[in-house]
Amino acid sequence: MPDLRLEKVTPDNVDAACRLAVRSDQERFVAPVVKSLAEAYVQPEVAWPRLVFAGEELVGFVMAFFDVRFDPANSDDRPRSGLWRLNIADGQQGRGYGRFAVESVCEEIRRRGQSRVTVTWGQGAGGPERFYLKLGFCLTGEMSGDQVVGELDLPTS
């Protein structure tokens, strides 16, 4: 397997990032990278966008969020950190790049002193549910808009 790494989005790689696309049947489940970058730009205090490289090849995009309340009006809703977006390029899936990206987000969340990772996803044929459940995420029974919420407890070091 080529050297896998995350890199910041820079002026040198932003065009390639914006061209990255998932399979057409997955487009209804994940926003395009350009939308994620716009969201990161207007919420830099919570967004952590990164590109996934295998060697010198851009194969994906991942964005984490930190200390966000899903329902700010609900005082019982605790701040969460987790996976906001995951886009693995069409033709690059099934090679461990998504797992690497999720594990990297988990490590960053652990590095920031937290012990739980949250993710949301849309359900339906061809959706990411099986992927997240296979990684150990468990459904919480909550909804965030029209998406289900999953969480993963991180082992302590």
Image: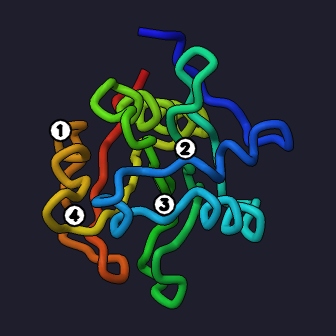
Q: Find disc 4 in the rendering and name its residue.
A: 140
Amino acid tagged 1: Lys
Q: Residue at x 42, y 79 (%)?
A: 76
Can you tell which of label 4 and label 2 is closer to the viewer? 2
Q: Find disc 1 in the rendering and name its residue.
A: 134
Where residue 65 appears, as percent x and y from the top left, is: 57, 56
The secondary structure type at the circle numbered 4 is strand
The secondary structure type at the circle numbered 1 is helix
Q: Residues within 10 Å of mark 1 (few under 14, many from 20)?
A: few
First reached walking from the N terminus: tag 2 or tag 1: 2
First reached walking from the N terminus: tag 1 or tag 3: 3
First reached walking from the N terminus: tag 1 or tag 4: 1
For the residues labelled 1 and 3, the Cα–Cα distance comes to: 21 Å
118 relative to 56 in the view: left or right: left
Amino acid tagged 4: Thr
Can you tell which of label 1 and label 4 is closer to the viewer? 1
Q: Find disc 3 in the rendering and name its residue.
A: 80
Amino acid tagged 2: Phe
41 relative to 84 in the view: left or right: right
Q: Residues within 10 Å of mark 4 (few under 14, many from 20)?
A: few
Q: Find disc 2 in the rendering and name its residue.
A: 61
